[in-house]
Image (cartoon, rainbow, N blue to C red):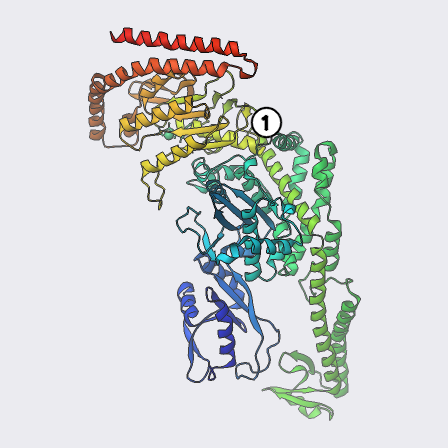
Amino acid sequence: MDNLTPLRKQYLTIKKRHTDALLLFRLGDFYEAFDGDAQVLARELDIALTSKPMGKGARVPLAGVPHHSLERHLATLISRGFRVAICEQLSDTPLQGEGSGRGLIERDVVRVVTPGTVLEPGLLQSKRNNYLAAFITDKGNAGFAYADVTTGEFAAAELKPSRALAELERLRPSEILVAESFDANAHLPNSFLTRLPDAEFEFERAKNTLLEHFGSSTLSAFGLRNKMLAATAAGCIISYLRRTQTSVAEGLTRLSSYDAESYMMLDAQTLRSLEIFESSSPASSLLAVLDHTRTPMGGRLLRKWLRQPLLDIAEIVRRQEHVARFVEYADEHEAMVALLDSIRDIERLFSRVHTALATANDLMALGSSLEPLIGLRRVLQRNTKLFGATLTALPPCDAAAQLINKAINDDRTASGGVIREGFSEELDRLRDILRDGKRFLSELETRERARTGIKSLRVGYNKVFGYYIEITRPNLHLVPQDYTRKQTLVNGERFVTLELKEHETLVVNSQERISELETSLFRHVCHEISKHRTEILGAAGTIAYLDVIAAFAETARSFSYVRPVVVNSNELQIKGNRHPVLERVMSDKGFVTNDVELGGRSAPQIALITGPNMSGKSTYIRQIAITILMAQTGCFVPASEATIGLCDRIFTRTGLYDRLGSGESTFMTEMVETAEILHHATPRSLILLDELGRGTSTYDGLSVARAVLEYIHNHPQLNSKTLFATHYHELTALEELLPRLKNFHVQIVEKGTELIFKYKVVPGSADRSYGVYAAKLAGLPRPVVRRAESLLSFYEKEANEKDVGQFAQQDSNRKSNTAIEAKLCEMLRGIDLDSLSPVEALMKLYEFRRLAEAENDARIARRA
Ligand SMILES: Nc1ncnc2c1ncn2[C@@H]1O[C@H](COP(=O)(O)OP(=O)(O)OP(=O)(O)O)[C@@H](O)[C@H]1O
Ligand SMILES: [Mg+2]
């Protein structure tokens, strides 16, 4: 070690503490990586790998990037899954001759950047939260917490593991912290995984970190008293941030415990198949068509609302009333939107101010984003009854806005500094000196020209030599005695005088002082602004709220959405319903609207929908689910009229696809998801089953589909509203067996050999699939289509004679059985247990038995 340079020793000491990260070591204008890190850096960023002598006989591999391009390179490294430790120079002015070993700048790692902890605006998506999560399981329970360090959002929850995983899927954290011993096979979402020593996940330790961080004495303060796992996860986040980041953890000043039960449950599969956030083309997700938000905060909140539709009618109604107001009062809506347009990302700007990363531009942007608050309040004040609570939650933040306005110079085009004139007397005085200095120099020039008689005499300045008087060669004989020669040029010489030297000292001193003073004043302003965090972040939250409300109003107005009546029952009634995304894509051709009525007292529980390929079955069932989801976020819906019973969960089993990497086949995936539905659905759930069973042979598929339908229909705990789209026409026979199942089909008109799609869903069943017709439309070669047609008629004949015959036979026994079962079930359901006397109960039993016996006799008679 002795033969190494001090710099090398310093590097090795720091690197030892960060073996799991790429260490970027600041050396002047570069961030350098050494040794193995250098090789990685060169490879990943495609930059040159060189080497540097760092001691006797020690040449070390080296690769580096200029300091100003750090952000760009960080983005690449983080996206490729690296953790990057950034080591800065902690003292500004390099001690002389660092290279030659006569002194060393103090250096240390100030941040370890990981996907969940980036702060650089360039690495963040403005309308998307960047979450860091922690996850822990124990004895059949799971705890998790998540934080967005750029906005200060911080929450924790404790749930069943499957539910917690579903929540994580929805949140899509960029990074998840788990214990070293955590099961590697658990189905965590596809995020950057950071494993921490098990000790970090010990409750006592994590609890203490958490309590100390918030200066609190009990977990009750966060609603986490009986939620040890949630508290542990939250504590882990704090200690991880403290270890990897300088002051970022301080930005997390509120922790909310959150109860996933208070939102409609949407698993990742449902979000995918309804194309809520993503779809094959980026413009056609529900988010994309609803996102008329103007601010990043609003954009992030809209995502959250779509992820978490409400189960609380009062809150839904509150949002609806606010939307309705802006739908009705276009002028208020316009005024609001214009103000929102001028607001930038207050949450992230504030967090930069708070963590001392802000630039003057950031501070100015924050100031100008606070100014519209007064205007926003004025709009809301037009109806204080409706917006009372919103107004309270929207503080004007005028003190902070004024401070920024007074302190920060918004015109920094010329030589003006960061701090505005008039903010600090001392600064103004120093600036005057500089300004006078300019005058002094031009006066000096005039004076010296007169004294020496040299017309071309010029006072100038350069960085190396400072101020000088320049005399051209032909005039050199006129130079006075008191000039001291400083530099010789081709065409002349440069001199200084005592007076000029004194002036230089004054200027340099003032400049240094100005720069020091500006830095400290800027820090002071940031610090003062930080004190307004409750107001500012509160206002930001309300701005986000108003932004989403205004966006909902805009969509409602432009696309004639209506306000749904949301009720606390299981009925569902929608008239003139459209698919919000499809109707926009095909605005010219005209989307055909449809109605639906399910649940409640008289409507069917299950709608079985048949129809040819491409007739609109999938579209129909999806638009209904999407409409319910929208209604529960407070949004108006694409319909002419809607009454919607609160839905606790939307289940979907749609489309054929493989769960890549899960090691399950297509059909297996289908069955796993169906099992999940049958285990978890409730009478308040909506189930979408699109062509269940088509992943296997016809009769297997048909049998599974039928069994599933019977189960949903007959199981008293399910009774869920169900939309079932299918090509199995055999299933339509179930209408006679299951009283709460009703057949529907999508209308088509046959015109010669052509089919005309009407896209209208009407009662009754379709008679054929027209799959071969679709094959023709798709442009399959003619011979293939013709052959398929003749095969089809052959199979149809065959099937009618054999298989279906058997099926029908089995059905007719089963049919009466199921019919009687269904009847008994209906009767049981009709009994009001609370008002039933024991005698009446006995009478009922006799009645049931009579029915059952009669049925038995009938069957024996049929067999005989
Ligand atoms: N209500 C509607 N109005 C107008 N066009 C519609 C409507 N519904 C569906 N379509 C059009 O029909 C196409 C096919 O719809 P969809 O995928 O729902 O059919 P499908 O019956 O589920 O077909 P498959 O049986 O092949 O799955 C849509 O992409 C859309 O272009
Ligand atoms: Mg379909």
Q: Residue at x 45, y 51 (%)?
A: 191
Reply above or below: 14 against 196: below
Residue 742 rendering spot, x and y as whole percentages: 41, 18
* Amino acid type indicated by mark 1: Arg
Reply above or below: 856 against 734: above
Q: Residue at x 56, y 38 (%)?
A: 305
* Residue 303 in sight here: yes
Q: Residue at x 33, y 15 (%)?
A: 815
Q: Residues within 10 Å of mark 1 (few under 14, many from 20)?
A: many
Disc 1 element: loop
In this rendered view, identify the residue nearer to me: 30 or 448.
Answer: 30
* Residue 579 in sight here: no
Residue 764 rendering spot, x and y as whole percentages: 39, 16
Q: Which residue is tagged 1?
A: 563
In this rendered view, identify the residue nearer to me: 260 or 215.
Answer: 215
Query: How many numbered tags mark residues here?
Result: 1
**Residue 816, image quadrant:** top left
Reply above or below: 345 against 750: below
Instruction: State which image quarter holds ligand 2.
Output: top left
Residue 151 rendering spot, x and y as whole percentages: 60, 51
